[in-house]
Image (cartoon, coloured by chain):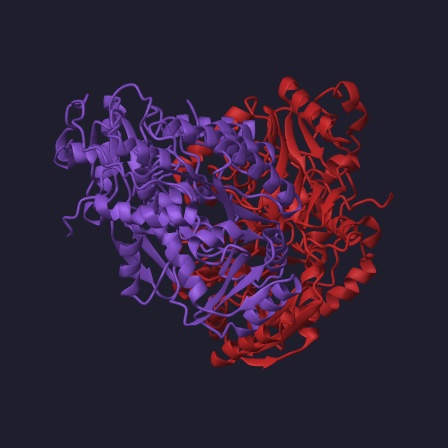
Chain colours: A red, B purple
Amino acid sequence: MTTRRRKHWGWGYEDEQPSTDEVRATAGAIVDVLGMGSTDVEEPAPLPELPAPRVAPPPGPLAAVWDTTAHARATHAWGRSYQDVVRGFRGDFAHAPDGVLRPQDEREVELALEWCSSAGVVCVPFGGGTSVVGGVTPRGIDGPVASLDLGALDRVLEVDQVSRAARIQAGVFGPALEAQLSDHGMTLRHFPQSFELSTLGGWIATRAGGHFATVETHIDDLVESVRAVTPSGVWESRRLPGSGAGPSPDRMLLGSEGTLGVITEAWVRVRPRPTFKRSAGVTFDSFMRGAEAVRALSQSGLHPSNCRLIDPVEAGFTGTGDGSAAVLVLGFESADHDVGPWMDRALEIAREHGGEAEEREDVVGTWRGAFLRAPYLRDTFVAIGILSETFETAITWDRFPSFHEQVLGSVREAAGERALVSCRFTHVYPDGPAPYYTVLAPARRGEEVEQWAEIKTAAGDALNAAGGTITHHHAVGRDHRPWYDRQRPDPFAAALRAAKRELDPAGILNPGVLVDP
Amino acid sequence: MTTRRRKHWGWGYEDEQPSTDEVRATAGAIVDVLGMGSTDVEEPAPLPELPAPRVAPPPGPLAAVWDTTAHARATHAWGRSYQDVVRGFRGDFAHAPDGVLRPQDEREVELALEWCSSAGVVCVPFGGGTSVVGGVTPRGIDGPVASLDLGALDRVLEVDQVSRAARIQAGVFGPALEAQLSDHGMTLRHFPQSFELSTLGGWIATRAGGHFATVETHIDDLVESVRAVTPSGVWESRRLPGSGAGPSPDRMLLGSEGTLGVITEAWVRVRPRPTFKRSAGVTFDSFMRGAEAVRALSQSGLHPSNCRLIDPVEAGFTGTGDGSAAVLVLGFESADHDVGPWMDRALEIAREHGGEAEEREDVVGTWRGAFLRAPYLRDTFVAIGILSETFETAITWDRFPSFHEQVLGSVREAAGERALVSCRFTHVYPDGPAPYYTVLAPARRGEEVEQWAEIKTAAGDALNAAGGTITHHHAVGRDHRPWYDRQRPDPFAAALRAAKRELDPAGILNPGVLVDP
């Protein structure tokens, strides 16, 4: 067992936080690359005292797993969006939950829901707390709140080598999940950017996007069955490779974001580690030329595992390219066969669309490094006065060019002329891409949250008006509600509300997320 | 416009029904091959007179599309399962709907639901009426019933060549859909066995299984967005290639079987016709050796479009093999690239598992012919005293061998020692196959329905007890309810009931299917 403590306001562990001098040194380099930020480094506020819990400790075995320390409550008060980190950095934890419940097994999850339902305590299911959409943030709630931290449910329980599936507890973090699977020669290969600090249950509850750029884009596609505890009983689907028996029960839990029940375990599809790999970087004059190539690739049936198109701006500041060209990071992998013919045809397609291809491992490595550093960098940005926001969506190919123009225009206007707004495709489908936008701008220090809200609103309005989805894999949470409410079919919203009332009659589960009562 | 009339009791059109002499000649051949059946050919009962409709014609524009002729009511009284055909063949139409509504546009669908809701008329949405699970059969309903036939909504409305998607009305039949797409150089390539007489809306409502043996196995995977009319308003999802905004609205309509709303149109993913094709037949000593090869293929990431494993019995009576060996029909197709490397590796895997491979087109053709003839043959079987029943499921690979043994054992016991029970895989997944069973037995003439029910019960009980799903792509309807009710998670059933009450407060939509009020 580790005794490392998580930072109470940002990404990662306390022992990973660089010193002020180190941050200042980094700031110098960042100012050079981005043309924004300051070596005037702000230090995070210390963990404040929190108001006394508004509820007495729970009865029975739950009393032993009820944690009301300030550190526990503060680390469960926010997710890890830019606005969350800013607020935590400044010591804003007034709305922190009254306590954190850490059930040691599923029976204690049931007890927790019973206690919350009968005592009128709001329950916020909590995996790794990496939400960037306010999914675990109990703000604006009257009355006591318990955060339900699934971290003790961290085991791979069973591995079925024949069917290539594993039964895994919901609270396990990405690296521990992979380490346990690795003992069986298997891997899930679901690597969201939050991988290090997010959990299987969180991925399922939020329909997380992962490693595979095509076909198996979301965790949805890797789920065989789900088990969840609801206030009205245990919800467990059968282990089935496929079914056509009514609407899929799993697809109703996928994306339910803690509003219908608490996911405790799942059977997921695993596989041996790939032994055949081919990677290439392909450069294009422009993002739009690259997009045409990616459209052809997505419609080719080649199913690349990696197919990330990065615009010139983002290629520049991530070091994936020199900033003059768009870069396509292309990869195929298999544990069964040489993927040479796949890559050969993919490169042919890329060249037919004006791409200049180079097969090299380092482009993947450079990209992966930048990808994994991003959450850490967000903390540094806050300290040195850079606003950073990301948002992502999906849109069909026919509308993509004008969609992209509208979104860029609106966001640039909101973010100011010194802002950098960049785009990449994280996942692609035969009928359209999932574009992911990054906004970096000089922060109005002390007003970052207002500034962030202006950009978020401009982005949400633009995505919504131009026909996109408010999220492809970040989820809805509380931050995306205004646009989600406009996007979803009204009768579906009514059906979802009715389902929630039925399963959670006391309305304790993550109120404010997805639907109102 | 055709003036051909559908047979009121069986598959296809009246002008396709062979004469008694022709059926007798066919019977001779069938007796030789199957060792059952009789040249004592029974003739179908004529269309009887039906009881007068229990409801006055609907008001306004609906009056013009309200059809109370005996032929209309009889062709909307049953689906096309064996028991349905037997009952129709014998002239049993006492429970036929009181009339058939044929809305000419979506507005008339809305009017129909308004009328049914206010007048207390049960509404059974009807596409092609090919259900084999009692999905369109209004038996056991108190009060008047209207069948809502979507046949007039039969157009491809829009084709997006860039995103490769098309907006198509729900009532279009398979061949008309493909003919219209073909004008745009596109194809949906969704070919369920019912293709000739089933509709896009029916496929979506029942999660139909199609052409592709891997990846895009169900219509679910080809749907981009769905539009449906519910008694509480229009449900329309956005056109999105992917989304992570809450539970998928489309996945709630997929499989809803007419209980939540009436699907009126959908955007679906289309593609150019494949220009590169490779096909092969591979024989195996035994079905289980073939299954091991198919497991390896399904886990290889090669994604064959065809991967049907047929056991020796079924290979024998369909002419796909000589009856001594299991036959794997394997195929790859692409509109983009030569699929040679794919097929080469697939055949290597098949050989590693003891398969003897032969690349030939005819095995595919032979199989396809038998596949498409089957619904016609069912009518003949009824006339010559052969019981035929099919049921299908899915199960993970680890459990498949014992599952198969249990299911075969139970069904053989129920069907009697002269019965033929065969199996094939229709679709395969990395974690398991979708086995499809066919039962042929000498019919107890005059008691076929009871005999069928005994076999159906034995099959359902065995599937359920051994962990399978009661259906992989035939749907639940009324016939599968007992096992569906045991299979689905209880809280999910409660959520679905609550959703239905919310959307269909008068409870008019297809009662008895999926859930009770």
Give me the residue at 63% from left, 33% from top.
A228
Above or below B510: residue A455: below
Q: Quadrant of the C terminus of chain B?
A: top left
Classify residue A195 as left or right of residue A416.
Answer: right
Would you identify the image quadrant in which residue A55 lies? top right
Residue A458 seen in this snapshot: no
Instruction: Pick the residue in front: B91 or B198.
Output: B91
Report the label total. Answer: 0
Residue A511 seen in this snapshot: yes
Q: Position of residue B171 (x, y in %)?
A: 28, 46
Q: Position of residue A78 (x, y in %)?
A: 67, 41
Above or below A432: residue B484: above
Classify residue A492 as left or right of residue B376.
Answer: right
Classify residue B333 as left or right of residue A103.
Answer: left
Give me the residue at 58% from left, 39% from top.
A257
Instruction: Pick the residue in front: A367 or B474.
Output: B474
Q: Position of residue A245 (x, y in %)?
A: 48, 38
Would you identify the image quadrant in which residue A193 lies? bottom right
Give me the residue at 46% from left, 70% from top.
A296
Classify residue B7 as left or right of residue A101.
Answer: left
Above or below A177: residue A146: above
Q: Position of residue B78 (x, y in %)?
A: 30, 34
Instruction: Pick the residue in front: A53 or B213.
Output: B213
